[in-house]
């Protein structure tokens, strides 16, 4: 590997570290990397282009996420410009959430969606506090479009669950 390739790879790693510090504005314990929102990152001679997959096309926090991405990357020494593009192909799915992201959702009191969920099929929701499956859906509509409100009958805690979003194969 030549020096230019090494430098490019190390700068990409530094940019990725910066992106790991960009938190979801609605779930402060989870980064956009944890959620699998970062689709592609191109680093070329002081310029960075980031393609981001929104979790939902109507997400009201996209402008905040864009601002936070730009701010985090602009703090990297040697970066002069940052371009953020929201892309919708491929579609974001909950399978993109990393294992660390799933744990951080639980720490925040949100039950993560099941991995490899088949759309239209029911999903098992575990309480993020005690792990019980003895839960009831209080409201399919939570504080955001991507979450529902549930109640754990074992530990008596209300909690939120992230709705599964799977690839429709279209």
Image (cartoon, rainbow, N blue to C red):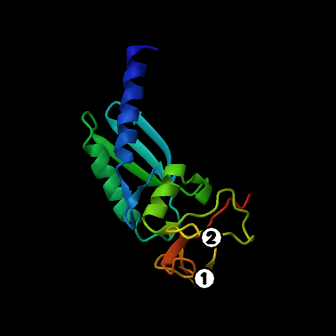
On-image quarter of the C terminus: bottom right
- Residue 9 vs residue 138: left or right? left
Is residue 68 visible in the rendered image? The answer is yes
Q: Residue furthest bottom?
A: 138
Residue ID at (43%, 21%)? 5
Element type where label 1 sits in the image: strand
Q: Is residue 56 above or below residue 81?
A: below
Please give the residue where the numbered disc 1 appears in the rendered image: 137
Circles 1 and 2, Cβ within 8 Å, touching? The answer is yes
**Residue 149: x %, y % from top left:** 53, 80
Q: Residue furthest front?
A: 154
Label at residue 18: none
Q: Is residue 24 above or below residue 72?
A: below
Q: Is residue 152 above or below residue 30?
A: below
Residue ID at (73%, 63%)? 118
Residue ID at (40%, 21%)? 6
Query: Separation of disc 1 and disc 2 at Cα?
Result: 9 Å
Q: Residues within 10 Å of mark 2 (few under 14, many from 20)?
A: many
Label at residue 125: 2
N-terminal of the pair, mark 1 or mark 2, is: 2
Q: Residues within 10 Å of mark 1 (few under 14, many from 20)?
A: some
Element type where label 2 sits in the image: loop
Residue ID at (39%, 47%)? 20
Quarter where residue 150 is shown: bottom right
**Residue 96: x %, y % from top left:** 58, 52
Is residue 146 visible in the rendered image? The answer is no
**Residue 79: x %, y % from top left:** 28, 37
């Amino acid at each position: 590997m030549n020096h230019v390739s090494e430098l490019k790879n190390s700068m990409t790693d530094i940019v990725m570290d910066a992106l790991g510090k960009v938190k979801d504005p609605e779930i402060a314990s989870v980064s956009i990397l944890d959620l699998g929102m970062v689709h592609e990152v191109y680093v070329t001679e002081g310029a960075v282009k980031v393609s981001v997959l929104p979790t939902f096309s109507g997400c009201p926090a996209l402008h905040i996420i864009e601002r936070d991405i730009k701010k985090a990357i602009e703090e990297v020494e040697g970066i002069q410009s940052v371009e953020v593009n929201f892309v919708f192909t491929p579609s974001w799915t909950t399978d993109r959430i990393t294992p660390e992201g799933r744990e951080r959702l639980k720490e925040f009191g949100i039950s993560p969606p099941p991995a490899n969920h088949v759309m239209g099929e029911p999903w098992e929701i575990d309480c993020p506090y005690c792990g019980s499956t003895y839960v009831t859906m209080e409201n399919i509509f939570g504080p955001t479009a991507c979450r529902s409100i549930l109640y754990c009958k074992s530990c008596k805690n209300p909690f939120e669950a992230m709705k599964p979003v799977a690839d429709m194969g279209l």
